[in-house]
Image (spheres, rainbow, N blue to C red):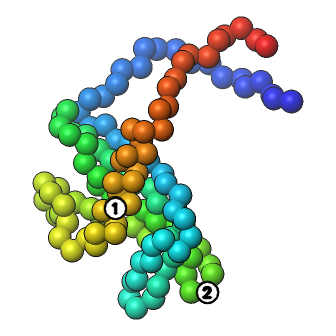
Amino acid sequence: MESSVDLSATGEPVFVQEDTQVDVGVHLREGTLTLTQDGVDLEPFHALVEFASVEERPWTAEKIKFSAKGPDGKSLGLSVDLLNDTCDGPRAGIPAAIWKVVALAATSAGDVGITYATPDPSPM
């Protein structure tokens, strides 16, 4: 049984176009990617890619956050900044496999066919 929410809201929200951000999460199949940091192999099982569009320019991947298992089986997080220090292009030295994860996230965001309709306010 759902409980009711004691909440009210007023106003007319306005979308800010100057800096729009979208985070896209993708689950990774076990054994398809290995990240190695300081000689330790990590097996990521989830990636969250942060995309941004500044001043109506094309979407850019800014950061990727991995959830991974270490050799001891414990979960840990790893973040990778994808933009260079001046934020005007990709950071040098990012492995191609990480860019493939970014491409998977970008593709899934456009391909999942998410549609939205305002909920019917009448109770069921």
Could you tell whether 15 is left or right of 53 in the image? Answer: right
Residue that mark 1 sits on: 100
Labels in figure, total: 2
Q: Which of 116 and 56 is in front in this view?
A: 116
Could you tell whether 115 is left or right of 85 in the image? Answer: right
Could you tell whether 96 is left or right of 43 in the image? Answer: left
- Say what secondary structure mark 2 lies in: loop
Q: Does the image show residue 76?
A: no
Q: Residue furthest right?
A: 1
**Amino acid under label 2?**
Asp
Mark 1, Cα crowd under 10 Å, few <14 / some 14-19 / many 20+, is few
Asked if 67 appears above or below 40 in the picture, the reply is above
Q: Does the image show residue 44?
A: yes
Asked if 114 appears above or below 59 in the picture, the reply is above
Asked if 45 appears above or below 122 in the picture, the reply is below
Asked if 72 appears above or below 119 in the picture, the reply is below
Q: Which residue is drawn at 15% across and 57% down?
A: 89
Residue 8: x %, y % from top left: 62, 18
Q: Residue at x 34, y 66 (%)?
A: 98
Measured in 3D between alpha carbons, the distance from the residue under mark 1 to the one under mark 2, in whole angstroms, is 26 Å
Residue 1: x %, y % from top left: 86, 30
Q: Nearer the viewer, residue 88 or 99?
A: 99
Task: Name which quarter of the figure residue 97 lies in.
Answer: bottom left
Locate the C terminus by quadrant. top right
Residue 17: x %, y % from top left: 26, 29
- Say what secondary structure mark 1 lies in: helix
Whether residues under marks 1 and 2 lie with C-beta atoms below 8 angstroms apart, the answer is no
Q: Nearer the viewer, residue 32 or 20?
A: 32
Residue 19: x %, y % from top left: 26, 38
Residue that mark 2 sits on: 72
